[in-house]
Image: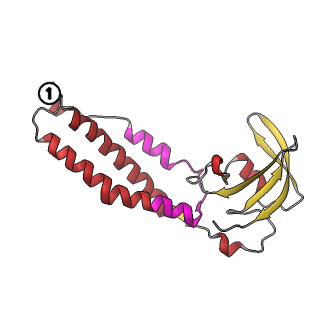
Amino acid sequence: MSKAFTKETDGADDEDRDEIDALPAGVKNYMTPEGYETLASELRFLLREERPRITEIVSWAAGNGDRSENGDYLYNKKRLREIDRRIRYLTKRTEDAEVVDPKKQQGLDRVFFGATVTYAREDGTELTVKLVGVDEADLTHGKINWQSPVGRALMKGQVGDEVTVRTDAGSEVIEILDIAYLLD
């Protein structure tokens, strides 16, 4: 059968559903202003610069004849699908985002989204983390997803509270030492 009548599939539809449905049903997509701006700027870059550049390459490569053995065409066509998938994901995330500004949460004595929390583990180690949105989490920078086991355990806690973190590996009691709503 001719390639003209076959459909290329790369599992894009299944991957999109998994990526977009990363939040549990009924949970709001909270984001800090910095996290929202990061996603929005990536979306602008992909739409205004990267996608037009790749589209131009695909168009040029398509004009070179046989596409079945044209590496430029095949590689950049795949790259274009990846960009389109990322654009759909970022569009969905930014449309559904509920931006929560830590500036408006000053003076709170409980842990809520956007809080920077210092806590002590059972082994005596102290950790400081900031509760951020799903798309912003980066443990190397001390940012954890507010829906993670630690994030959920800390929510609504106060200084001095001991809360239980439940994971697949078991349970651990941690003590909240400090709560702050720092501005980045």
Using the image as rendered, state which of residue 72 and residue 10 is in the foreground: 72
Using the image as rendered, state which of residue 61 and residue 174 is in the foreground: 61
Q: What amino acid is at disc 1? A: Ser
Is 162 located above or below residue 110 in the figure?
above
Is 15 located above or below residue 128 in the figure?
above
Left or right relative to 57: residue 80: right
Find residue 41 and report its horizontal and vertical position in percent: 43, 61
Residue at numbered disc 1: 2
Element marked by disc 1: loop
Given the current orientation, which residue lies at the most extreme top position?
Answer: 1
Is 79 located above or below residue 104 in the figure?
above
Quarter of the rendering containing residue 167: top right
Using the image as rendered, state which of residue 51 and residue 98 is in the foreground: 51
Find residue 75 and report its horizontal and vertical position in percent: 27, 36
Local crowd at mark 1 within 10 Å, few (<14), some, or many (≥20)?
Answer: few
Give yes or no for residue 104 being in the magenta stretch.
no
Q: Residue at x 72, y 67 (%)?
A: 181
Q: Residue at x 59, y 64 (%)?
A: 32
Give the extent of the magenta segment.
12-40
Find residue 7 and report its horizontal and vertical position in percent: 24, 34
